[in-house]
Image (cartoon, rainbow, N blue to C red):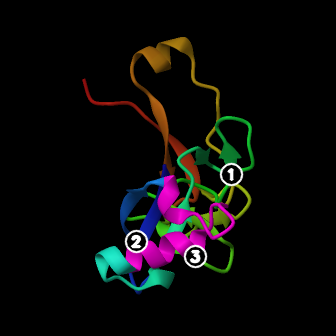
């Protein structure tokens, strides 16, 4: 099965449709995104160029089965299609975060959250949360 993201005029993913592989084969019997786009235009009355193929097996710039990653991430409703970088990514979580176009993921300007919680902190549900004002990773423990 092939998957296609229906894109809005603001590049947001509206939905993802599954299409039979036989419906996206060109005259030579090869899978062809443009054939799938034409098929979806015909059956949905949505512009062909607003259907973008996506891979169910791609996440964070990696193919789950060891194959070639395709367009950064499997598209999901609300994600963004970045035509310039040929990737799908989630909405920016904080104004300061930076997009890594190789992994199609957002990262804080100071790097990943620390990985130094004690066993007791983890048992209590403590986690690191991003503090946009302070530009820092802060520990947060749920109220008892």
Rate crowding at label 2 as few (under 14), some (14 to 19) or many (20 or more) other CA atoms within 10 Å.
Answer: many
Query: Disc 2 and disc 3: Cα gap in Å?
Result: 14 Å
Disc 1 element: loop
Magenta segment: does it hold 34? yes
Query: Disc 3 and disc 1: Cα gap in Å?
Result: 23 Å
According to the image, label 1 marks what residue? 61
Q: Is residue 7 above or below residue 67?
A: below
Q: Is residue 95 above or below residue 144?
A: below
Magenta segment: does it hold 45? no
Q: Which mark is residue 45?
A: none
Residue situated in front as seen by the camera: 104 or 68: 68
Side of 48 relative to 67 (left or right) = left
| First-in-chain label (2 vs 3) | 2
Residue 56: x percent and y percent? 53, 47
Q: Is residue 57 above or below residue 134?
A: above
Query: Disc 1 and disc 2: Cα gap in Å?
Result: 21 Å
Residue 14: x percent and y percent? 34, 69
| First-in-chain label (1 vs 2) | 2
* Predominant SS of the magenta segment: helix
Residue 87: x percent and y percent? 62, 66
| First-in-chain label (3 vs 1) | 3
According to the image, label 3 marks what residue? 34
Q: Quadrant of the C terminus?
A: top left
According to the image, label 2 marks what residue? 6
**Disc 2 versus disc 3: nearer the observer:** 3
Disc 3 element: helix
Can I make out residue 95 in this image? Answer: no
Q: Residue at x 43, y 57 (%)?
A: 19
Residue situated in front as seen by the camera: 58 or 116: 58
Magenta span: 21-41
Side of 139 relative to 108 (left or right) = left
């Amino acid at each position: 099965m092939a998957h296609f993201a229906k894109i809005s005029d603001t590049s947001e993913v509206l939905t993802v449709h599954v299409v039979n592989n036989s419906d996206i084969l060109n005259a030579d019997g090869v899978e062809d995104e443009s054939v799938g786009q034409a098929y979806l235009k015909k059956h949905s009355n949505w512009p062909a160029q607003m259907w973008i193929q996506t891979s169910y097996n791609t996440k964070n710039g990696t193919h789950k089965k060891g194959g070639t990653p395709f367009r950064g991430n499997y598209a999901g409703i609300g994600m963004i299609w970045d035509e310039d970088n040929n990737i799908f990514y989630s909405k920016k979580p904080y104004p300061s975060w930076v997009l890594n176009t190789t992994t199609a993921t957002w990262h804080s300007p100071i790097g990943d959250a620390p990985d130094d919680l004690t066993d007791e902190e983890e048992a209590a549900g403590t986690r690191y949360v991003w503090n946009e004002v302070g530009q820092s990773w802060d520990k947060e423990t749920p109220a008892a």
